[in-house]
Structures are given as structure tokens and as C-alpha cells.
């Protein structure tokens, strides 16, 4: 979905918060179920970054990435009690650098994946053009 005009500030703020939530949940869960925790966390980052780009374009992806990276950076540091959420272990490195790579993959994905294109009749292909269940068009198709 291509946004109309420049993304509004509230969209970008919402995407920064979305990045913060994704970073907190992923940091908390990436070591939960080895190795599936980090796989699920990276899949969540990929899904969220694609959603951010589809919702607000490249500025939205940058806002999401900034929220995610800042949150992961803050949470990877040693806490006041000496605890560490992202230790210097392979799974921690996969979470940090893999998450950055996943956001970069979303940034370099082709732009045509994120815009609605008209079909050969000039209509925009979306769910709005699908006939409702039980309409005349559907009954003709079923009855021949």
C-alpha cells in the first residue's frame, strides 16, 4: 500500500513505538526456546519491517529500524544488577546482527512489492474489487 503524500508524523511515531515493542519482545524471547526463539524473533522483525515499509514507505522503515535498533542496544547492555539480556554468545550475535540484516532486506526489497498496480482493465487490484458472496456474478459462475 503506497501512502498518499509524505508520511504523517503520527505514523512515524507509531512505527518507532512498534520497533520498540518488537525489540523488547524479541530481546526477551530470542533465548527462550533454543534455537526456535531466535528464529521466531527474527521472523517477527522481518514481518514488522515489511509492514512498516508497506504502511509508510521508506521513512516508515527507517522509523521502525531506529526504534528496534535503539531498544536492542539499550537492552543488550549490562543492567544495574549485573544481568545481561543479550550475552556475548552466538545466539546474541545472531539476534543483533541478524535483526539488522532482516531490516536491510526489507529496505532493499523491490518497490513494486509495496504498491498497488492496476490490472489490464485499469482497476486497482485490491480486496475492494472482489465480489461479495451470493452476488449475481458468483451465482453465474457457479451455475454456468
Image (spheres, grey):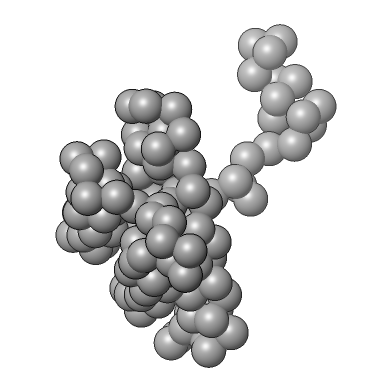
To which quarter of the image does residue 118 belong?
bottom left
Question: Taking 34 as reference, is 82 above or below it?
Answer: below
Q: Residue at x 53, y 81 (%)?
A: 13
With 123 as the anchor, is 43 left or right in this view? Answer: left
Q: Position of residue 103 (x, y in %)?
A: 28, 58
With 73 as the anchor, is 8 left or right in this view? Answer: right
Q: Residue at x 35, y 44 (%)?
A: 42
Q: Position of residue 58 (x, y in %)?
A: 32, 73
To which quarter of the image does residue 100 belong?
bottom left
With 79 as the anchor, is 91 left or right in this view? Answer: left
Question: Where does the C terminus fall, quadrant-wise?
Answer: top right
Farthest residue, direction front: 81
Q: Position of residue 116 (x, y in %)?
A: 42, 58
Q: Is residue 9 visible?
A: yes
Q: Nearer the viewer, residue 125 or 79?
A: 79
Q: Is residue 43 visible?
A: no
Q: Residue at x 33, y 27 (%)?
A: 35
Q: Residue at x 58, y 84 (%)?
A: 10
Amino acid at each position: 500500500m503506497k501512502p498518499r503524500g509524505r508520511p504523517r508524523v503520527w505514523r512515524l511515531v507509531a512505527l518507532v513505538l512498534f520497533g520498540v515493542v518488537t525489540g523488547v519482545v524479541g530481546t526477551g524471547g530470542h533465548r527462550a526456546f533454543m534455537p526456535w526463539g531466535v528464529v521466531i524473533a527474527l521472523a517477527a522483525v522481518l514481518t514488522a519491517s515489511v509492514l512498516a515499509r508497506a504502511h509508510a514507505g521508506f521513512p516508515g522503515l527507517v522509523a521502525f529500524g531506529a526504534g528496534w535498533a535503539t531498544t536492542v542496544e539499550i537492552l543488550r547492555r549490562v543492567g544495574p544488577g549485573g544481568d545481561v539480556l543479550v550475552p556475548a554468545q552466538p545466539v546474541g550475535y545472531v539476534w543483533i546482527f541478524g535483526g539488522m540484516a532482516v531490516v536491510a532486506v526489507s529496505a532493499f526489497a523491490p518497490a513494486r512489492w509495496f504498491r498497488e498496480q492496476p490490472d489490464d482493465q485499469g482497476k486497482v487490484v485490491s480486496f475492494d474489487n472482489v465480489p461479495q458472496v451470493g452476488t449475481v456474478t458468483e451465482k453465474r459462475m457457479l451455475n454456468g
